Image (cartoon, grey):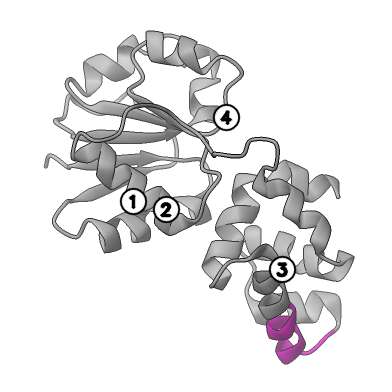
Amino acid sequence: MDQDILVIHQHRLMLDMLEHGLQKQLPELTVATQLFIDTAQTTQKLKIILIEIEQLNKVAFKNLEPLIKQYPGARIVVLGSHPLPEALLARGVHTIMDLNQSLDDTMQRVSEIISGRGRGIMVSKDPANPPCSVFSRLSEREREVLRALCSGQKSVTIATKMDISPQTVHSYISRICTKLEVDTRQESVFLGMRHYEELQAL
């Protein structure tokens, strides 16, 4: 069965959040997900492919031709930062999104791409202050909770491992959201997953 949007991301949690966001923002379109590029798939018609940059960093996919042939006519949107984004555009990528915005803003950008109003390099307006810098606002315990959330752990599991009550975990999550300037737990995880290496390094 043909789909409208294919999302390829190696992290299940991020994949699920992107899928949920797309279904909410674009309910009229069908969404399929993959944890990795599946070369065994037969040729399919798609409107758009959202693929994380790490997938394209794999040696086998330095050349985008296999992906383009597998999904002819699909707009390839790369999620993540690249030192030479123009090179990706030259290789057949339709749009590069650095994801330095909220989940809702990301979904809005995807909607614009599908409607033909977005193309090229879609980056944050203030690259001198990327969102990863906000992790320094968190206390070490708050960062520990956020790392656990990003790894898919439930509040009860986090409470047990940190030897605190579930209510205290929820209190940490509330403070995390306030300090990261996001509205929900899911958005804090979305931000943490996008910049997981920076979060781990603190």
Q: Marks 3 and 2: CB-CB under 8 Å? A: no
**First to last magenta residue range:** 164-172
Disc 2 is placed on an element classified as helix
User: Sequence-wise, which precedes: disc 4 or disc 1?
Assistant: 4
C-alpha span from label 3 to label 2: 19 Å
- The residue pinned by badge 1 equals 108
Between 124 and 64, the residue placed more toward the observer is 124
C-alpha span from label 2 to label 4: 17 Å
Between 152 and 20, the residue placed more toward the observer is 20
C-alpha span from label 3 to label 1: 24 Å
Residue type highlighted by circle 1: Gln
Residue 74 x/y as whole percent: 22, 27
Quarter holding the N terminus is: top left
- Give the side of residue 131 with respect to residue 70, left or right: right
- The residue pinned by badge 4 equals 81
Tell me: residue 12, above or below residue 62. below
- The residue pinned by badge 2 equals 105
Q: Marks 4 and 3: CB-CB under 8 Å? A: no
Residue type highlighted by circle 4: Ser
Q: Is residue 120 magenta?
A: no
